Image (cartoon, rainbow, N blue to C red):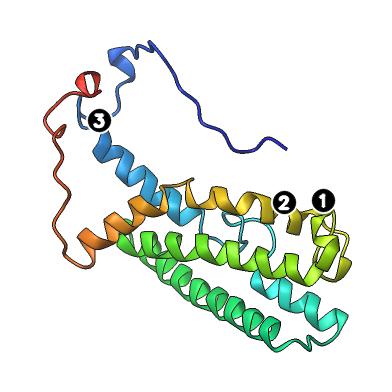
Amino acid sequence: DHTFNEVFLDEVRIPAANVIGEVNRGWDLAKVTLANERVSLSSGGAIWGMGPTADDLVASIRKHGPVTDALHRQRIIDVWMEGQVLQMLRARLVASALAGRQPGPEASIRKVMADEHGKHLFDVARDLAGADGLLWDAGPYGEDSALWTRGFYFSPALTVGGGTTEVQKGILGERVLGLPRDPDVTADLPFSEVS
């Protein structure tokens, strides 16, 4: 299943009529675009807003019987609480957008948390599936659903798309914690001269 890739465009020339914004200020536009992308990727499901949620996992557990292992129970509670916090952060982002404000660092906070949450959620679901978790179409308790397995295999990609976890943490360090920016030796160079 091919859903995540990197594309390089070499020797591409854009006609001057198609330039958006001020020449050599593309990164400013890209930052706004990426912040909005982080908001759009942060809706309910754990695969960038799609797919199963922590609530879906809990519903599956309720349907199939009790979890007797104390470690599994604790992991389920942790994943459910993460899901609740992410829902609250999403509500704040939506309220901010409805008020006409651009996404701020809270979008980066939610992105970092959501990426880790997705990995936790799919790890727990796979463990609840037991040996069936190795099958493509098996979810927790042997449910016939490829969404859980696809999510497990796709979850590492969550930390790359929409801005890597490292980039998000840099944004948070600068804009939330007030840490100094990393020096940018290419700041005054046009993109064509950056190697």
> How would you rate the neighbour count of disc 2 (Cα within 10 Å): few for under 14, some for 14-19, many for 20 or more?
some
Q: Inspect the image, locate mark 3, and give the three-letter code of the amino acid beneath it.
A: Gly
Please name the residue shown 80% across and 75% down the image: 60
Q: Residue 70: x and y, percent?
A: 70, 89
Say whether disc 3 or disc 2 marks the residue closer to the N-terminus. 3
> How would you rate the neighbour count of disc 3 (Cα within 10 Å): few for under 14, some for 14-19, many for 20 or more?
few
The answer to the question of whether label 1 and label 2 lie on touching residues, with beta carbons closer than 8 A, is yes
Q: Nearer the viewer, mark 3 or mark 2?
A: 2
The residue at which mark 2 appears reads as 150
Q: Nearer the viewer, residue 14 or 94?
A: 14
Q: Outermost residue toward the left?
A: 188
Query: 35 left or right of 4?
Result: left
Query: 22 left or right of 138?
Result: left
Q: Residue 27: x and y, percent?
A: 26, 36
> What quarter of the picture does the N terminus occupy?
top right
> How would you rate the neighbour count of disc 1 (Cα within 10 Å): few for under 14, some for 14-19, many for 20 or more?
some
Q: Residue 173: x and y, percent?
A: 24, 62
Say whether disc 1 or disc 2 marks the residue closer to the N-terminus. 1
Mark 1 and mark 3: Cα distance apart in space: 46 Å
What secondary structure is marked by label 2? helix
What secondary structure is marked by label 1? loop
The residue at which mark 1 appears reads as 136
The residue at which mark 3 appears reads as 21
Q: Inspect the image, locate mark 2, and give the three-letter code of the amino acid beneath it.
A: Arg
Please name the residue shown 14% across and 26% down the image: 189
Q: Inspect the image, locate mark 1, and give the three-letter code of the amino acid beneath it.
A: Trp
